[in-house]
Each structure stands twice: as C-alpha cells, then as structure tokens.
Image (spheres, rainbow, N blue to C red):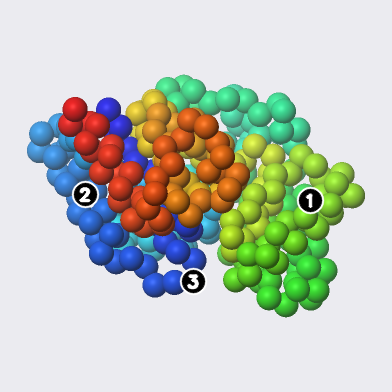
Amino acid sequence: MIEYFVSDVDGCLATPFQEPDWEALNQLRAYHQRARLERQTKGHSAYPLLSICTGRPLAYTEALTQWLGIRTPFVFESALLFDLESYQVTGAATHQGAWIQTDISSVHSIDPTDDYELDNFSSLSQHPGVRDIHQVKEWFLQDVVPKYPEMSIEFAKILDAGLVCHNPELVDIVEKETEQYLKQQNLNHLEVHTTDVSINVLLGGNNKGLGLRLLANAFQTPLSQIAYIGDSSGDIPALDLVGRPFTPANARTIVRQQEGYHHLTSQTTASVLEAYELCVKDNMG
C-alpha cells in the first residue's frame, strides 16, 4: 500500500512561469479530500494522502498546499519540514543521529521509525555550515547576477543559495561556473542541483533524500509506503528512497536515465495525476 504521495513542485505540480493546470490540480485536491475523509470515517483509504517536497521557499510552498487542501507536513528548501498545524519549522542539521556534517560522506541515515528529536529553525540557522551558504549567496549577488542580468537571486531562501532564470542554456553555463567556484573556494562539501530554471546550492546531505526521511518520520510511515515524483537532479536522492519513484516525461536527462524509476509519458501536472491514479489502482489490487 502507498499511504502517502509526495510531489516536487516545479516541473511536476507546476510548470515554472506558466499558469497552473487547474483542472489537474483540482482533481488531485479532490483525491486528497477523499483520502482524508475515508481515513476519518473508515480508518483506511486506497487514496494516498498528498504532500510536497520541493526546493522552493516556505511562503510559496505553503500557499500551494493551502490551494490543494493539504494539511500533512511538507518539505521546503529540500530538507526543512513544516507542520501547518503547529506552524513550526524543523530539520535535522545538528541533531545526533541525524547529523549533516560538512563532509557529505559522513551523513547518517535516518530510520523513519526512530524516536529522535528534531532541531528547530533557530538552531538550524546557527549551523556552522550555513556560513558557507552565505558565502555562495554573496558570490551570486556580487559576481554572478551583475555578469548575467537574466539571473535573479532567490531572496526568500533560508539554508539554500538559489538563482532563478528563464533561460535553460544560461542555467547550464552558470551551473558549471558555480561548480568551479566551489572547487576554488574549497567548498566541495556543498551540493549543486539544477532544474531548467534554477540553480540551488545546499549544505552537503541537506537534500531531498533527507527531506523524504523527515516526512516518513513525521508520517510514521515506512519509505516503502511512500510514492514520490520528481524531475531534476535534486530529486534523485528522494526517488532512490521511496517505494514508488515516478518521473514525468519532461524530467531532465540525468533523471530519465536512472533505472528503477517509473518513467511516465505524460508531462508536469498531468504526470502527477497519472502517477497518483496508478498508486490508487495498485492499492485497490
């Protein structure tokens, strides 16, 4: 059984810079409402509950969850967990047993059934590695944006240095320059992930793989009972963990080349709806 269906935003639930597919989103919203109602009245449902795991900032993600009627915890900035009921941000950057070291090879795995405390935003924002993120933000602001005026800083990000651009070719150029900068500055422990419209630099290990583990812990549900759909390199750490990994037809080449994923022929929001309905069908047997 797939109990939770988690989706990325850009390239999945929405197409960047374009009007949303309201018809598909409304259908997903109706499915989620049914999932909640049947769990309340019957104790179970073949319809998974919806959630989101995205690199987008909190305000944008919260607005989207409200449009979809999502009340489950969700992930923003790849690995920060937000609970709408308590209105609290938590993560796992500094807690023993879920430690995000500056050396990516030393990131501990998280068992979703483990009983451990999470860190609040105050402690997360004081993590020593955040200084490196601030350094990258300053480089973006002082060197990259003046050089490439089409680029814009993602000012709302907290633990993530992000750039946005309408031009995918320019994204590829700046991605290479970012990797060179990190190497020159001895910041190779940071992760770089791109979409067609964005570049994101994260603390090593503070990626969507961690985000999905945090969601599994919040749901008290094994990762094997969670489905995820994603389209970019930043989604691979999450896709590799879940029981049902899906990719849309518009996913980046590096994602479509991965084995073991269910590669759909539909695109963006239509693919999310298709993947969700496949999970329902399988749940019904």
How many residues crowd mark 1 within 10 Å: few (<14), some (14–19), many (20+)? some
Q: Secondary structure at mark 3?
A: loop
For residue 66, above or below residue 284: below
Please tell me in which quadrant of the rendered image residue 93 appears.
top right
For residue 17, above or below residue 215: below
The quadrant of the rendering that contains the N terminus is top left
Please tell me in which quadrant of the rendered image residue 284 appears.
top left
- In the displayed structure image, the side of residue 207 where residue 277 appears, left or right: left
Instruction: Inspect this view and state whether residue 226 appears.
Output: yes
- Would you name the residue on which mark 3 appears? 17
| Gap between marks 2 and 1 measured at Cα | 41 Å
Q: State the image coordinates of residue 273 (x, y, percent, origin top left).
A: 30, 51
Callout 3 amino acid: Phe
Q: Which mark is residue 179?
A: 1
Q: State the image coordinates of residue 4 (x, y, percent, origin top left).
A: 32, 37
Q: Which mark is residue 248?
A: none
How many residues crowd mark 3 within 10 Å: few (<14), some (14–19), many (20+)? few
User: 220 or 181: nearer the eye?
Assistant: 181
- Whether pointer 3 and pointer 1 mark residues with C-beta atoms closer than 8 Å, the reply is no
Q: Secondary structure at mark 1?
A: helix
Which residue does the image show at 72% across and 77% down from the upper left? Answer: 149
Which residue does the image show at 45% across and 45% down from the upper left? Answer: 247
- In the displayed structure image, the side of residue 205 where residue 60 appears, left or right: left
- Would you name the residue on which mark 2 appears? 31
Q: State the image coordinates of residue 38 (x, y, percent, origin top left).
A: 14, 40
- Spot the residue most to the front: 265
